[in-house]
Amino acid sequence: MSTRTHVKTALASAALLVGLAGCAPASTPPAASAPAEATGRLSGTVTVFAAASLKASFTDLAAQFEAKNPGAKVMLSFAGSSDLAAQIAQGAPADVFASADTKNMAKLADARLLDGAAANFATNVLEIAVPPSNPASILSFADLAKPGVKVVLCASQVPCGAAADAVEQAAGVTLAPVSEESSVTDVLGKVTSGEADAGLVYVTDVKGAGEKVKGIAFPESSGAANTYPIAAVGSSRNKELARAFIALVTGADGQKILGEAGFGKP
């Protein structure tokens, strides 16, 4: 089992979330339960809190949403899912939350901070990212544990870190990261900057990085796939816009953009 420790901010966030009372876990209704995406008649601003791994896809979706609804504006905020959940629990003005795992969404559902049930819209799996030259000659997950290999992981409370922990346990391999990051994009940044020999990120991050990194798939990743849910936040000031954006993400256009980025079906 991994002995990696959480960052201090994560401990504070976790303590806050534990204190929130509730009884309704997140559930997954069919996408058809969301209202059909409106076109042209919507106006106002919708603030979307989304997992860091969704940055490219949701940026494209926001542009599409605004093009279809000239009176609407989408404000995007990307970070680790655990950090975003903590911010919402503390009262941050979000209308939509898209998490990289069901655990952080369930915390908000349990605290009754959502407007309706969450809907799963994508899946993602881990992949090893190395510099194009692969200086540490990484070929497998077990290679990440070799002496002298500088590997970077997400912190355990972040979905990509929890997935890495699950892979470690399943494979019987314990990693000793040189650093633990609060988001998957920070892990990727350590690799692209040459500060790390390897990092565990999502398949979508490797694909989005293009020639900046080389991706190494490993079979153990299939046992730790992450499911991404999305929901409207109960304190939303523009629930109509929130529901319309969710409908775009879960609908055909959103699924096309997500699929092209490398996400799997929910």
Image (cartoon, grey):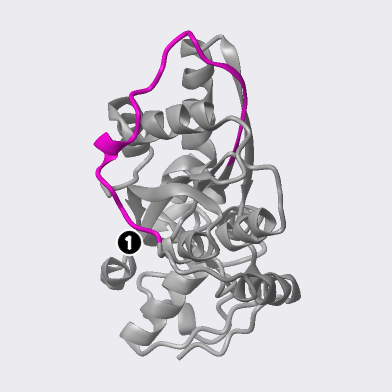
Neighbour tally class for label 1: few under 14, some 14-19, many 20 plus, Cα within 10 Å: some
Picture coordinates of residue 162 (x, y %)?
Answer: 47, 73
Please state, as top left, top right, bottom left or bottom right, where the N terminus lies in the image.
bottom left
Residue visible at 59% across and 84% down in the picture? 4
Q: In this view, does 224 lie above or below 207?
A: below
Q: In this view, does 6 lie above or below 264?
A: below
Question: Which of 144/133 is in front?
Answer: 144
Picture coordinates of residue 48 (x, y %)?
Answer: 58, 38
Q: What range of the chain is rendered magenta?
A: 26-48
Would you identify the image quadrant in which residue 95 lies?
Answer: top right
Count of marks placed on residues? 1
Q: In this view, does 222 lie above or below 211?
A: below
Q: In this view, does 172 lie above or below 206?
A: below
Residue visible at 40% across and 51% down in the picture? 229
Picture coordinates of residue 223 (x, y %)?
Answer: 28, 71
Residue 47 lies in the magenta-colored region: yes
In this image, 237 relative to 57: left or right? Answer: right
SS class, disc 1: loop
Report the residue marked by disc 1.
217
Looking at the magenta stretch, what is its main secondary structure?
Answer: loop
Would you identify the image quadrant in which residue 172 lies?
Answer: bottom left
Residue 29 lies in the magenta-colored region: yes
In this image, 116 relative to 152: left or right? Answer: left
Residue visible at 57% across and 84% down in the picture? 176
Residue type at tag 1: Ala
